[in-house]
Image: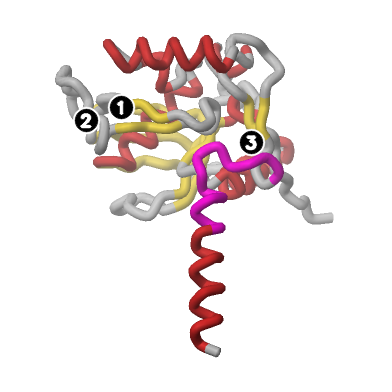
């Protein structure tokens, strides 16, 4: 019987699996294939551009992505046991709050600016065992770095500097995200980044247009 993927709850900052290095995948078996299928569905339901296995509670070196501007790389895919190489230096200047802010499904509802390399190389394997080897630029490179960080036990908020680090620490104390056991469920809980509100606005516009066309 064919496996039916399921949406998994997303772990929130404070869950131990998010803060330790993930283990290498030793064999791409049926369990791994089911996990990857679940991750793709969960990422889609959460409206994210990337998702790492620790974010669904599994400490393995796997992440998925879905992004339009990927150059010659696939717009959607997964990588198992990735190796990430920075090909562009990370600027030491202050990040731009408008163009360099990141969000994270495991830090729901927040966004902070962070400098990243704008050019990286990614190597690894697909769920079918095929080799991956491509370069990523711009925001796609940022996604690759963000997800790879998860596999080493880092969230992007752990890399913040100066006032942004201080703002995150205040948010962390406010939310109390230093304990295990917190998750949110895509498609069930309210979208923490406001996508639900945008959809409702579009629904209102569509309804108004429909009324005008009668």
Q: Residues within 10 Å of mark 3 (few under 14, many from 20)?
A: some
Q: Tell me the quarter of the image containing the C terminus.
A: bottom right
Is-magenta flag for residue 106?
no
Q: Tell me the quarter of the image containing the N terminus.
A: bottom right
Q: Is residue 196 above or below residue 163?
A: below
Residue name at image x 40 percent, y 30 percent: 111
Closer to the camera in the image, 44 or 141:
44
Provide residue 167's location: percent of width, then percent of height: 38, 15
Q: Is residue 22 above or below residue 4?
A: above
Sequence-wise, the earlier of marks 2 and 3 is 3
Q: Quadrant of residue 142?
A: top left
User: Residue under circle 3?
Assistant: 28
Q: Residues within 10 Å of mark 1 (few under 14, many from 20)?
A: many
Closer to the camera in the image, 59 or 94:
94
Mark 2, mark 3: which one is toward the viewer? 2
User: Residue under circle 2?
Assistant: 96
Sequence-wise, the earlier of marks 1 and 2 is 2
| Label pair 1/2, CB-CB below 8 angstroms | yes
Provide residue 191's location: percent of width, then percent of height: 58, 42
Could you tell me how far apart the alpha carbons at marks 1 and 2 are, in whole angstroms? 6 Å
Scheme by which the image is coloured: secondary structure
Q: Quadrant of residue 24?
A: top right
The numbered disc on residue 113 is 1
Provide residue 175's location: percent of width, then percent of height: 57, 17
Could you tell me how far apart the alpha carbons at marks 2 and 3 are, in whole angstroms? 40 Å
Residue name at image x 26 percent, y 36 percent: 98
Closer to the camera in the image, 180 or 33:
180
Residue name at image x 79 percent, y 55 percent: 2
The numbered disc on residue 82 is none
Label 1: state its secondary structure: strand
Q: Is residue 190 above or below residue 154?
A: below
Q: Which residues are magenta?
A: 188-200
């Amino acid at each position: 019987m064919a496996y039916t993927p399921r949406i998994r709850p997303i772990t929130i900052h404070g869950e131990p699996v998010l803060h330790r290095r993930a283990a290498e995948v030793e064999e791409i078996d049926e369990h791994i294939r089911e996990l990857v299928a679940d991750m793709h569905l969960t990422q889609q339901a959460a409206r994210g551009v990337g998702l790492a296995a620790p974010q669904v509670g599994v400490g393995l070196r796997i992440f998925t992505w879905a992004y339009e501007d990927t150059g010659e790389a696939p717009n959607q895919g997964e990588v198992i046991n990735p190796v990430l190489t920075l090909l562009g230096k990370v600027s030491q200047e202050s990040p731009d709050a408008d163009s360099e802010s990141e969000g994270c499904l495991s830090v729901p509802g927040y966004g902070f600016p962070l400098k990243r390399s704008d050019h990286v190389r990614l190597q690894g394997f697909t769920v079918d065992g095929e080799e991956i080897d491509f370069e990523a630029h711009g925001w796609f490179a940022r996604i690759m770095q963000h997800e790879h960080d998860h596999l080493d036990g880092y969230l992007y908020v752990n890399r913040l500097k100066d006032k942004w680090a201080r703002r995150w620490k205040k948010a962390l104390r406010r939310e109390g995200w230093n304990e295990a056991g917190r998750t949110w469920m895509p498609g069930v809980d309210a979208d923490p980044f406001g996508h639900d509100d945008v959809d409702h606005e579009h629904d209102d516009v569509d309804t108004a247009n429909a009324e005008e066309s009668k």
